[in-house]
Image (spheres, rainbow, N blue to C red):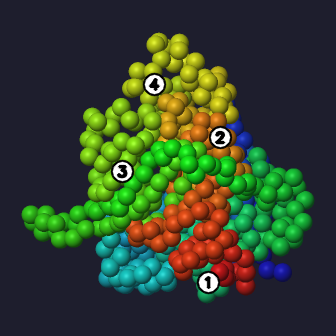
Amino acid sequence: MSTPFLQVRDLAVSFRSGGRETVAVDGVSFDIKKGETLALVGESGSGKSVTALSILQLLPYPVAHHPRGSVLVEGREMLGAAERDLRRVRGNRIAMIFQEPMTSLNPLHTIGKQIAEVLILHRAMAKKAAWKRAQELLELVALTDAARRLKAYPHELSGGQRQRVMIAMALANEPDLLIADEPTTAVDVTIQAQILKLLGELRQRTGMAVLPITHDLKIVRHVSDRVCVMKGGKIVEAGETRRLFAAPQHPYTQMLLAAEPKGNPLKSDPSSPVVIECTDLKVHFPIKAGVFRTTVGHIKAVDGVTVTVREGHTVGVVGESGSGKTTLGFALLRLVKSMGHIAFEGQAIEGHGFAAMRPLRRRMQVVFQDPFSSLSPRLSIYQIIAEGLDVHRIGKDEAERHALVAKVLEEVGLDAAMQDRYPHEFSGGQRQRISIARALVLKPRLVVLDEPTSALDMSVQAQIIDLLRALQDRYRLAYLFISHDLRVVRALSHDVVVLKDGVVVEQGPSAEVFDHPKTDYTRALMAAAFELRAVEDGVVKT
């Protein structure tokens, strides 16, 4: 048998901090052959990304170090290798695409310049040839209108388009191994299916090996030949994909396979009071051009949407990136300018400015997608949650506010003694619970949940959905739940609004929309979310 392209043997990784040493990876071993796909699976903190970064020696040394182990690329040791030897491997023999393309791409340079730079540095291509090859790479990853996209900046592309750009950059030097770190976590279900299919097709066409890293075993099922399941820095189970899915041996693997949002929305009363409603809501952003910045057109982010959210009721808003989901939520909260009628608790608020809205803010709250970026790293958990109490003058003194914060932390399943800690000391699921506590402490009537589970592990997603359901039952909260994950929406929402290009293409009771979709677009979303089943030679079929 031929020697594997990559051999990892007894790899250990430790981090030094303040005199303490934390073991992140402990004795990991696996091989990858050319043309093979091996997936590393596990929840946040399992050590899978640290393992992948160790292969290319991209960890922050000397804070990170390897007490033992070996990483061989075609028989050559990577651990402790000279920088010039590592440069020959990085980007050439092994390439990597990261989880969040927006933070991986330089916002100051065009897409074309960033792809061409890879070719100029690694292959000494002339600028003109590099730009031509950059366009070919964008066409290879099926990015529409590739010639025009070369001149675009990252912020002008959707999440799925940016991820395709990252794949194009990684493929620029035709690597033997592509490491894909959570390549589909932050993208829509339809884009997720497209990226998985693309990776399968590229693998077939180029013969490269792929090392996908993910917390979602259901994705792995469709792209990998073998799977290594990681927990606590160790591989707890490994094997051929079909066997592992058919008969998982380790309890942790069984838990990952079973972990997904379950249950149904709470029973709701159709005669409950209306908390917020909008009629023919529009949000149009002007397109300006020329020296005098004349308005030459409009981007219709939201175009004629009508929604009603009642007490104890959840309305799910679904659609692809750029469909207008988040803009709709922000418009209802009067955080972006809009046209059309908006009423909150029976009071028309479409004409309200900042001062008029301020007294209403405590009764309408929002929970964002990424809890790490939405929580200030400089403030303690108490300061973060109590900020709203201070603004709205709730609690007669500091002691009473501490008591209110302690109570709300316990309500979201956290220890009240954690008040003096900082966000970086918590896991992703705990940080999202803190974000929910920050909203809940003000006793709101409406909570806009903007992708609150998309960045979380599957098991944590299920916990957060159960928490939101329990809080809604206890406080009769009205939720506007924005998500691209239809499994999560189905578990929580009473009604569903399907958006495409700012327009409602379908709307109605959750069961009706999910079980009997009326439009081709809704059917495509459902197929991508629930029917990603058939696999043939690594190519996903929907």
Q: Residues under labels 1 and 4: Cα distance?
A: 53 Å
Kindly identify the residue that appears in the image at 60 percent across and 36 percent down.
475
Looking at the rendered structure, the kind of residue marked 4 is Leu
- Badge 1 density bin: few <14, some 14–19, many ≥20, Cα 10 Å: some
Looking at the rendered structure, the kind of residue marked 2 is Asp
Q: Quadrant of the N terminus?
A: bottom right
In primary-sequence order, the first of circles 3 and 2 is 3
Q: Is residue 534 above or below residue 480?
A: below
Circle 1/circle 3 CB separation < 8 Å: no
Q: Position of residue 27 (x, y in %)?
A: 79, 51
Tell me if 165 is positioned left or right of 34 in this view: left
Circle 4/circle 2 CB separation < 8 Å: no
Kindly identify the residue that appears in the image at 43 percent across and 75 percent down.
119
Q: Which residue is mark 1?
A: 201
Is residue 266 visible from the viewing direction of this image?
yes
Q: Position of residue 471 (x, y in %)?
A: 63, 39
Q: Which residue is mark 3?
A: 342
Q: Which residue is mark 4?
A: 389
In primary-sequence order, the first of circles 1 and 4 is 1
Q: Is residue 120 above or below residue 154?
A: below
- Badge 2 density bin: few <14, some 14–19, many ≥20, Cα 10 Å: some
In primary-sequence order, the first of circles 3 and 4 is 3
201 or 56: nearer the eye? 201
Q: Which residue is mark 2?
A: 473
In primary-sequence order, the first of circles 1 and 2 is 1
Q: Nearer the viewer, mark 3 or mark 4?
A: 3
Looking at the rendered structure, the kind of residue marked 3 is Ile
Q: Nearer the viewer, mark 1 or mark 2?
A: 2
In primary-sequence order, the first of circles 1 and 3 is 1
Looking at the rendered structure, the kind of residue marked 1 is Glu
